[in-house]
Image (cartoon, rainbow, N blue to C red):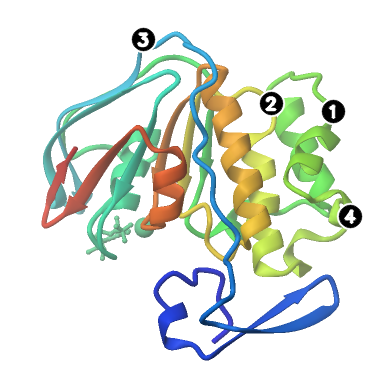
Amino acid sequence: MSEHRLDQLRPLARTVVVVDAGRVETHDASVWEAPRIEVAKHSSTADRAEAWSLHEVTAGFAGCPVVGSVNLSGDGGEVIALSGPNGGGKTTLLRTIAGMLRPLSGKVERRPGRIAYLPQNPGALLHRPTVRSEVELTLQRARDAEPADAILQALGLLEVAGRYPRDLSSGERQRAALAAVLAGKPSLVLLDEPTRGMDAGARAALVSLVARLRDAGAAVILATHDVALIGSLADQVVQVCGGRAVA
Ligand SMILES: Nc1ncnc2c1ncn2[C@@H]1O[C@H](COP(=O)(O)OP(=O)(O)O)[C@@H](O)[C@H]1O
Ligand SMILES: [Mg+2]
């Protein structure tokens, strides 16, 4: 199996083969140490005013509810994780918070400011000829003078910055999409399964980038069942399943 998330696979494996920068190393699985994931502690007391909220929201499609009577809110400087099984409604809830899906009933409120939304399929986002121009487009639209290379470097993308996004590996494409949405100073950060296909180094880069946006006052919502990511970043976990969302 070719995989990054080894917590549950490792007890079944005899051998771990690490393939890194052109080198292949074989380790005995019983003694191999997986890279550790650090907790991104809060480094400032950003303004903790409410940034978004759902009041008695029912969300779904063509009149059929997926989740009902949801009351949730989040502050600037706070990270909330939406967790739960496939098909539970995480993406539906995230799109409702983003304003991309109208609730069937109830009220959605957001403070003004830019929304950074990473869809579950990042390919849907990438249309420009190079990775760098994807980031530049976001910064131009936000009238942000930050150089594109800052976030490309933070996400380890400088080497592929001149390449066509659709020709990248899936992990690189995921990072390219993250760079394209997270560049500049978004006020609300909504990421759907952000660590999909990402290796340990890329995950660490994502965690520190999200922690930096959080500490700058962004409200963050992650739809994920990645327990390590939740452990690193989330202040609150909301279980979304069986039509309900319980914090
Ligand atoms: N565009 C859509 N039209 C109709 N049903 C949908 C649509 N998108 C998702 N659903 C349904 O909504 C439910 C929740 O899906 P989703 O929010 O994607 O869950 P999760 O992100 O937790 O895996 C599923 O039963 C799914 O089939
Ligand atoms: Mg989903």
Task: Identify which residue, 28 or 189, lies in the foreground.
Answer: 28
Q: Which mark is first along the chain, 2 or 3?
A: 3
Q: Are marks 3 and 2 in contact (CB under 8 Å)?
A: no
Query: Which sits earlier in the primary sequence, circle 3 or circle 1?
Result: 3
What residue appears at the point 47 percent right and 56 percent down from the top-left corner? 120
Could you tell me if the residues under marks 3 and 1 are in contact, i.e. CB atoms within 8 Å?
Answer: no
Q: Which residue is mark 4?
A: 159
Q: Are marks 4 and 1 in contact (CB under 8 Å)?
A: no
* Residue drawn where x is 31% and y is 45% of the image: 82
- Of marks 4 and 2, the one in the foreground: 4
The first of marks 3 and 4 along the sequence is 3
- Which mark is on residue 147? 1
Which residue corresponds to mark 3? 49
Badge 3: how crowded within 10 Å, few (<14), some, or many (20+)?
Answer: some
Q: Which residue carries the number 2 mark? A: 184
Q: Position of residue 156 (x, y in %)?
A: 78, 50
Q: Amino acid at mark 1?
A: Pro
- Image point (46%, 14%), residue name: 112
Give coordinates of residue 50: x percent, y percent.
33, 14
Q: Is residue 58 left or right of residue 218?
A: left
Helix, strand or loop at mark 2: loop
* Label 2 or label 1, whichever comes before in sequence order: 1
Quick one: SS at disc 3? Answer: loop
> Up-down: is 44 above or below 227?
above
Q: What's under tag 3, amino acid-wise?
A: Ala
